[in-house]
């Protein structure tokens, strides 16, 4: 084959027909468009859908990914576009790698982000290995994030559309995974552009609503899911102030989150109180004034670093960080303690920083993501 072949749209110096790509298909419009677009461009596409949890429970719930209806939708797209499609049973893997930790984290008073663990431990690990077993050159997903080639190799960048950006959920993507992954939607200006492509390809899922909530938590009812997984998790206890004085009773620590104000059932007080700490050992929900929610110093561990230099090569990194998926990045100083742990100092304190959430590192002056880690109690 001639050496001067131009790179195709996936970055390989060979014709699309000789480039095999596994597309992770959830059954939604995003991954369906990726698969259809690559198939139309002439790539050797293989669609793979993961069955992550029980079909019977999932069929009754609309708006979840990787459930019965979604498997049907993914298969239909594959049939329409003429490429093979496989369904892999990952229920046990998903439960062990994602659901169990989710339940234990909530019981520990943390606020977990299972979508990150699913990407990290299932989609970008097990599924990625399956793609390699299928002799694929790369794996493509429908995530809204960009992969750009920098001086040191592939870099992770925020999506062009800030309203769709999923970088917070993908910070733990390793350099090795990034070398193999492709994100064809990251450059699109809006979700409307994705739906327009779906309509162009004649896909039945063009108007399918986006998935809501966490896929295995029907209607956002975390507590009922955790009660089923961990009987006794909803044991009642005391609501106490920061000095330990009992102000009332609660119906189980798992029903509360850091920063919560409503639904505490302790009226008659002059100033509003917020949940500032959850202590599952004593079954205490600790409340305090709003200013008690502010945090400046955040301990972070399990850091995945995506910078060009070693994380510990500097005493301080001046970057921006996100401590919740819904918040904009804020200026911070990151002080490495080891290759995987750090102290993060926010220049302006934030409210409601919760153990179990991610702290994601961003370049202050462009779209690059430098990785991130998990907030813990210290």
Image: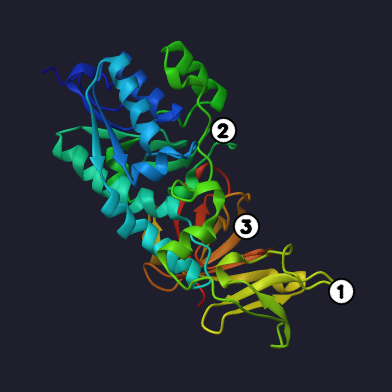
- The quadrant of the picture occupied by the N terminus is top left
**How far across and how far down the image is residue 145, in percent?**
46, 38
Query: Mark 2 highlights which residue?
Result: 161
Residue 144: image location, x then y, percent = 47, 36
SS assignment at label 1 = loop
**Tag 2 near tag 1, CB within 8 Å:** no
Q: Mark 1 sits on what residue?
A: 268
Secondary element under disc 3, as helix, strand or loop, is strand
The residue where tag 3 is placed is: 331
Query: Is residue 137 toward the left or the right of residue 141 in the image?
Result: left
Cα separation, mark 2 vs mark 1, equals 45 Å
Say what secondary structure mark 2 lies in. Answer: loop
Task: Locate residue 128: give its quadrant.
Answer: top left
In the image, residue 179 sits, relative to residue 272, either above or below, namely above
Q: Which residue is drawn at 15% across and 21% down?
A: 3
Viewer-side residue, 300 vs 204 = 204
The local crowd at label 3, few if under 14, some if 14 to 19, many if 20 or more residues have their Cα within 10 Å, is some
- On the picture, is 311 further left or further right than 377? left
Question: First in sequence: mark 1 or mark 3?
Answer: 1
Q: Can residue 5 be seen in this view?
A: no
Mark 1 burial class by Cα count in 10 Å: few <14, some 14-19, many 20+: few
Q: Which of the two discs, 2 and 3, sits closer to the camera?
A: 2
| 343 vs 83: above or below | below
How many discs appear?
3
């Amino acid at each position: 084959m001639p050496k001067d072949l131009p790179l195709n749209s996936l970055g390989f110096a060979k014709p699309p027909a000789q480039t095999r790509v596994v597309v992770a298909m959830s059954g939604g419009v995003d991954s369906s468009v990726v698969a259809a677009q690559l198939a139309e461009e002439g790539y050797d596409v293989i669609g793979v859908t993961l069955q992550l949890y029980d079909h019977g429970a999932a069929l009754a719930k609309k708006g979840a990914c990787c459930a019965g209806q979604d498997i049907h939708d993914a298969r239909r797209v594959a049939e329409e576009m003429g490429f093979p499609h496989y369904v892999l049973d990952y229920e046990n893997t998903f439960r062990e790698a994602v659901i169990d930790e989710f339940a234990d984290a909530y019981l520990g008073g943390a606020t977990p982000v299972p979508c990150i663990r699913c990407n990290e431990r299932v989609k970008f690990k097990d599924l990625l290995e399956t793609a390699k077993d299928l002799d694929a050159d790369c794996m493509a997903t429908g995530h809204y994030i960009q992969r750009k080639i920098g001086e040191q190799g592939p870099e992770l960048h925020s999506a062009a559309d800030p309203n769709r950006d999923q970088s917070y959920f993908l910070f733990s993507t390793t350099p090795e995974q990034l070398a193999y992954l492709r994100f064809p939607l990251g450059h699109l200006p809006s979700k409307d552009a994705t739906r327009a492509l779906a309509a162009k390809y004649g896909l039945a899922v063009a108007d399918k609503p986006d998935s809501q909530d966490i896929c295995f938590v029907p209607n956002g009812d975390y507590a009922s899911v955790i009660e089923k997984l961990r009987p006794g998790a909803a044991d009642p206890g005391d609501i106490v102030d920061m000095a330990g004085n009992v102000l009332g009773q609660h119906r189980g620590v798992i029903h509360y989150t850091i920063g919560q104000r409503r639904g505490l059932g302790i009226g008659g007080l002059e100033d509003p109180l917020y949940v500032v700490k959850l202590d599952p050992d004593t079954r205490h929900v600790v409340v305090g004034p709003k200013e008690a929610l502010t945090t400046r110093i955040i301990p972070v561990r399990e850091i995945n670093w995506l910078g060009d230099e070693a994380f510990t090569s500097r005493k301080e990194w001046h970057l921006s960080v996100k401590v919740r998926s819904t918040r904009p990045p804020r200026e911070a100083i990151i002080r490495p303690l080891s290759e995987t742990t750090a102290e993060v100092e926010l220049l302006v304190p934030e409210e409601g920083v919760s153990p179990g959430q991610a702290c994601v590192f961003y370049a202050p002056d462009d779209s690059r993501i430098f990785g991130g880690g998990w907030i813990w109690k210290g």
